[in-house]
Image (cartoon, helix red, strand yellow):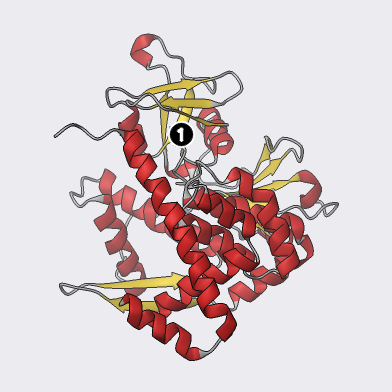
Amino acid sequence: MGETSIERVLELEREIARLQALQARALADYSTPRGHAVDVASELALALSISENSARIKMTLARDLVSRLPKTLAAMSRGEIDAYKASKVAGPTSVLSDSLAREVDAAVADRLAGRDPSSIRRMVNRTVHKVDPDGAAARAENRRRERKVELMHTDDAMATLSANLPAEVASAAYARIDRRARALRNTGDQRTMDQLRADVFADLLLGNHAGTPSAKAEIFVHVDLATLVGLANNPGELAGHGPLPAPIARAIAFDPKSTWRRIITDPRTGAPIDVGRERYRPPAVTADHVKIRDRECRFPTCHRPAHYSDLDHVIPKQRNGETNTRNLIGLCRRHHRIKHTPGWQFHLTDTGTLHITTPAGHTYTTP
């Protein structure tokens, strides 16, 4: 049997998306006339052999696409995005009025193709901030009231403990866990990094961390100068997460107890113009510049914060590649390894734009 081409896989994916768009229209036609009757989800759950919660999610998405996000639905009908990616438009816009949701829909629909789900969610969140800037702080405050901890039992004597927290708190907590885990790894501990982070997390919660190497958590919050001094209310950005309402970004920047590094950016270009120096060790200037510039792993679909990434020479050192900001990029460990897999090509321009060519010959660009 002949080898299936990537183009065939893509065409099947587009066909799935088109069918999902048809299903969304059918679901909306079926459920909308019955309003929010509780039995609608029950009936659909039975028909599809899914949970009632899953049925409600499918129906809500279908209604939103048909009534509030018609351009996103059109993108599905063209096979550009599937239902999961469409949900990344519907989620952030669910807090908006119908008219504002349609405004966001019109602004993002032509930019959905070729983006991964996380990138779509981030783009939509930024657009929501733009069309309703006055509501950003209120939305964040409402979300923060929903913070909680959940315990979900899984198989084989395991369970998942999760916490829904303010983004900057969760990021700082993860950074602390990661630093402790890396410190243990550097002492020769043979556990994997995932195992170490899980064990450190449990030890910290249970108070079993005596003698564990300590390290200060460090994450980056980017805020433009005008917003920092109160002349504007543009959203800040938490590396690896996305936009933060201006009041929260300012509060983090000026909090003397903050463990976050404040990055002041040019409001026109987003380029860093000042970096807070509150940290344990003096910064390595080149490494800091690259991590602050990149913000995240440079692989197009990866959003791991750059301060957890490796610094990699685009032109290898053994081929006379220089160790400077024009030849260094941040890549998470997994994508660092992919870069060195035969068939992959990376090219960094003078402006910092990265072009990645895959073994199949497709080229992807990240500015």
Query: What amino acid is labelled 1 in the image?
Result: Gly
* Image quadrant assignment for residue 11: top left
Q: Position of residue 88 (x, y in %)?
A: 53, 59
Front residue of 357 and 151:
357
Q: In this orientation, does residue 239 appear?
A: yes
Q: Position of residue 342 (x, y in %)?
A: 27, 23
Task: From this view, report whether residue 150 is shown above or below residue 85.
Answer: below
Name the residue furthest bottom: 38
Task: From this view, report whether residue 333 is shown above or below residue 216.
Answer: above
Q: Which residue is mark 1?
A: 330
**Mark 1 secondary-structure assignment:** strand
Front residue of 47 and 252:
47
Q: Residue at x 48, y 78 (%)?
A: 148
Task: From this view, report whether residue 360 is shown above or below residue 252.
Answer: above
Q: Residue at x 70, y 43 (%)?
A: 264
Query: Which quarter shows the N terminus?
Result: top left
Q: In this orientation, does residue 219 appear?
A: no
Question: Is 18 placed left or right of 350 in the picture?
Answer: left
Q: Residue at x 24, y 57 (%)?
A: 195
Question: Is 94 placed left or right of 119 in the picture?
Answer: right
Front residue of 301 and 336:
301
Q: Position of residue 306 (x, y in %)?
A: 48, 41
How would you rate the neighbour count of disc 1 (Cα within 10 Å): few for under 14, some for 14-19, many for 20 or more?
Answer: many
Q: Residue at x 35, y 45 (%)?
A: 12
Query: Which quarter shows the C terminus?
Result: top right
Name the residue furthest top: 320
* Image quadrant assignment for residue 124: bottom right
